Amino acid sequence: MKHCINCGEQIDDEAEVCTDCGVNQQTSLESGHEDRGENEKYCVNCGELINKQAEMCPDCGVQQPSLGGADSEKIAAGVLALLLGGLGAHKFYQGNVKLGVVYLCFFWTGIPALLGLIEGILILVADDAEYEEKYADGSLLGR
């Protein structure tokens, strides 16, 4: 195992691209980790420092991979809460097995379905930071 030249995560020795950040391991990064700003990342192809939200590298023109991240996770959790909230599907998806089991045990009362509907709406209207703070960081998930 070796470490990624960009993010430092462990990757296979034969890997050409880091599975975590997507940076090509065959390129040399001219600047170290200390020079990278909070809103910057390295291009997955040429290793140039670019804006974190850039969809394409301005230097080499290669499209950057979408990490999905909180936005797609938030949408999935919200839709699960709306459609299967009475069974606690969104709680299991978010990693809160204890509450998921409670929802599952009491689904016949209809109360978990009502809570799931409310939680689904709250999850979908929350901005990414609020979702991460309230639902995804584990503070309310019983972890």
Image: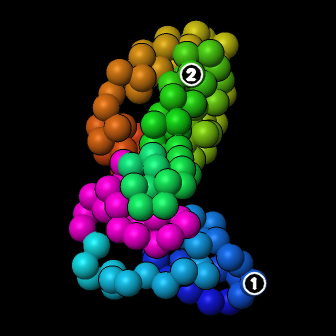
Residue 12 position by quadrant: bottom right
Q: Which residue is mark 1?
A: 14
Mark 2 packing: few (<14 Cα in 10 Å), some, or many (20+)? many
Q: Quadrant of the N terminus?
A: bottom right
Q: At 54% across and 50% down in the image, what residue appears?
A: 63
Say if residue 85 shows up in the picture.
no
Indicate the amino acid at tag 2: Val
Q: Nearer the viewer, mark 1 or mark 2?
A: 1
> Would residue 58 appear left or right of 17 to someone viewing this image?
left
Q: Earlier in the sequence, mark 1 or mark 2?
A: 1
State the mark number for residue 136: none
Q: Which residue is mark 2?
A: 79
Assess whether residue 40 is covered by the magenta stretch.
Answer: yes
Please state which of residues 116 and 66 is positioned toward the viewer in this rendering.
Answer: 66
Q: Which x, y percent locates residue 97?
A: 60, 44
- Do the CB atoms of the residues marked 1 and 2 lie less than 8 Å apart? no
Q: Quadrant of residue 27?
A: bottom right
Cα separation between marks 1 and 2:
39 Å
**Residue at the image position 34 percent from the left and 38 percent from the top:** 128
Which residue lies at the image location 75% right of the left edge and 84% below the top edge?
Answer: 14
What secondary structure characterizes most of the magenta part? Answer: loop
Residue, far right: 14
Element at badge 1? Answer: loop
* Residue 82 position in % (x across, y down): 55, 16
Measured as percent of width and height from the top left, residue 115 is found at 47, 18
Q: Which residues are magenta?
A: 37-53
Element on which disc 2 rests: helix
Q: Is residue 17 visible?
A: yes
What is the basis of the colouring in this image?
A: rainbow
Structural crowding at the residue carrying mark 1, measured as other residues with C-alpha within 10 Å and reported as few (<14), some (14–19) or many (≥20): few
| Residue positioned 25% across, 78% down in the render | 35
